[in-house]
Amino acid sequence: MKIFVLAVFAFVMYFIITGRLNRTIAAMAGGLLLLIANVFSSPYEGLRQTVDVNTLLFLIGMMIFVRVMEKSGIFQYIAIRTVKVAGTKPVSLLFTLTFIVVLVSSFMDNVTTVLIFIPITIAITDILQINPTPFIVSEIFASNIGGTMTPIGDPPNILITSAAKIPFLEFTLYMVPINLIILFFVDLAIILISGKDLRKEIPEEFIENFDESKAIDDKLRFVTSIIFMIVVLVLFLLQKQLNLESSIIGLMAGFFSLLIFERKEIELFLSKVEWEVIFFFLGIFIITGAMEQVGIMSDIAKFLIDISKGSRIMFSSMLVWISGILSGFIGNIPFAATMIPAIKQLPQINPAVFSNIQPFWYALSLGVCLGGNLTPVGALANVVGLSLLKKHKGTEISFKEFIKYGFVAVAISLVLSNIYMLLLLEIMK
């Protein structure tokens, strides 16, 4: 049975990596095949055991919430204000844009973040007549770095924190400092690589022509949206004290935003839920659950422990680097889903060394989320960001050219993450 489950997993991963078949169809076909193949005692029992309902409901709620908030113009307003704050130097513009992208993407999905910021960035570079590539690439990287900072910023973190039961505030406090440091050094590297593209001065009158007020159609809705977003953020920060699952907060954010702002047109916003992503997760849950059921995850965990020779430091370092490199090619969502059950197995395999597996959840998060910057297909934000550049400018960044930036960004990210994990291992003894 192990060989059959591995074969299904391999075929699904082949289609996800090559893009020869829609990834959701591949994942669901593989999952459904395993449900009817007697891997579990019954198909229903297989669903019950494997599907993380908390994650799926959270995603649905937050997708609705983001779409409703987007209509208020708040994200466009932030983008235009960012340009005004940056001043007249492209280097300062890059630093400011990426910093705001990091903050925004830490609380909303990376794809929406790049959809908002990249068109504005392309407009800026058009007027300045400079190469948009360094800006677009840095914003893609920033969206993935920002997504690493909170449990809701990137899909792998949703999976990890749901499985590990890590509260929002605790996870965020550990992840924000290291990711801001990584952002600074990644930006610095892109500036050095880009050279003359970022030396041109921006005319003052150009900046003055931007009018953020045009992003606001309804001032009352705009102000109310800000208040509502703050309330949702407070709920996440107090998640542990309130004893609320992230799915409940996500659903409250989504459906109360509909109640407040869109009572008459909910069909439009429900249709904007990315059901393709939801069913992709569903299929991946079933496949990785089947791998756990037949003992493959336990084998992976034992293999990693054997290589690390029972050293927590070695295991943590391996997790950061292996996750980072493989996520760049496989995609960070399926890799995270594959590794979560393996990490859960650690205390059973070697309880003396791995009695506390808390640090390894952070190592996995840093690896899979930051490793997504390695290739154009490492994260969904990469694919969307590059497609926007091609759509608006007719410029296509090749796989090889992207890796020129991605290799440097990921190398910096993983080195700093590895150092940070050594500190966390000491703190979480």
Image (cartoon, rainbow, N blue to C red):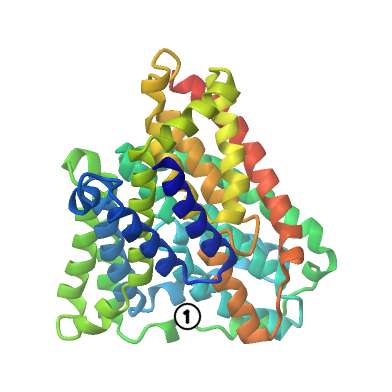
Instruction: Tell me the element at label 1.
Output: helix
Q: Quadrant of residue 298?
A: top left
Q: How many marks?
A: 1
- Residue at image coords 49%, 34%: 300
Residue in front for this viewpoint, 266 or 172? 266
Kindly identify the residue that appears in the image at 76 percent across and 78 percent down: 130
Say which amino acid is labelled 1. Answer: Glu
In the displayed orientation, state which residue is furthest to the right.
196
| x, y percent for residue 388 | 58, 79
Query: Quick one: label 1, few (<14), some, or many (20+) residues within 10 Å?
Result: some
Quickly name the residue at label 1: 212
> Residue 97, how many percent across, how many down?
59, 65
Task: Tell which of 46 and 154 is nearer to you.
Answer: 46
User: Which x, y percent locates residue 115?
Assistant: 50, 75
User: Residue, x 34% and y 80% (percent of image)?
Assistant: 71
Which quadrant would residue 135 be assigned to in this image? bottom right
